Image: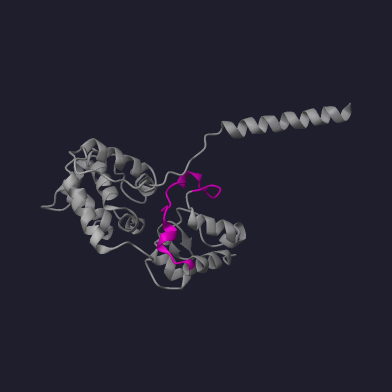
Amino acid sequence: MTNLKVLAVVLATLGVYTWVANSIPQIESAVPVEVSFSADVTEEELVTAGEQLYYGGAGCVTCHGLEDRAPNLLADYAGEGPIGLRCATRVEGQDCKTYLYESLVDPSAYVVGGGTFDPMVFAAILYSPAQLWALVAYLEAQGGNVTVTAEDVVLAEETATTTGAAGPVTASTDPVEIMRNTLCFGCHQLGDEGVEVGPPFEGMGSRLDSDYIRRSILDPNREAAEGYEHLLGSMPPNLADMLTARQLEILVEFLSGQE
């Protein structure tokens, strides 16, 4: 009889914990879906695709939702309004969409308010012309008029086709150099280098095994380290495409050794 009571208590306890676990909202990784527009794409379609990318795999809110890293693009900044209202005033003689597009493909040219631009370089590496122009359209819509057209998208895609597909961003086999070139230090820290937004690289080998580290590079938005769940979805989803197989294993071995 006593054993049955103990069993009942155990089952009831497990049931309660299961109910609590299932009642907690789950955060899903939202990777940027490749988009393709026809020659008659509408303003609404561009803005909608840009919004999905902004809040999804582009990880824009990781920095532009935190005032200490970069200006908030969707809210007022320095009394100038949201980005769609202030973008045309940044560079004399430059219209809004040109400023926004160049800020994505060459972020070092326009660093506002002392912000950091390192993670922004991912935009030019990871996202297609259609995705970049969709982002521009969405940002223009924040307080301003959307001037991005299908012609902008088509012309950019034709130019990209002639330049060939992207590959590894560096031929280096030095792990720190690989991380510099793939801009890991824009969100992670190792010693005095980098910014601690995501998990630090120091001590990573004592916290995580090599299989977990490898999975985190191959499928970075599958799961988040404890305490960093709010950043899930902000890692470049095709980070592994920027590495050779050898470079991947070099990074895994290096990070596994950080104890």
**Is residue 204 rendered to the left or right of residue 131?**
right
The kind of secondary structure the magenta stretch mainly shows is loop
Which residue is farthest left? 93
Is residue 21 placed above or below 198 in the rendered structure?
A: above
Magenta-drawn segment: 222-245
- Give the camera-side residue of 36 and 51: 36
Image quarter of the C terminus: bottom right
Inspect the magenta stretch and tell me whether residue 238 lies in it: yes
Q: Which residue lies furthest to the right in this view?
A: 1
For this view, does 93 lie left or right of residue 71? left
| Residue 250 coordinates in the image, percent (x, y) | 51, 69
Q: Is residue 170 left or right of residue 226?
A: left
Task: Specify the color scheme.
Answer: one colour
The one nearer the camera, 202 or 135, is: 135
Q: At x 63% / y 30%, what residue is drawn?
A: 19
Determine if the magenta segment contains residue 2. Answer: no
The N terminus sits in image quarter: top right
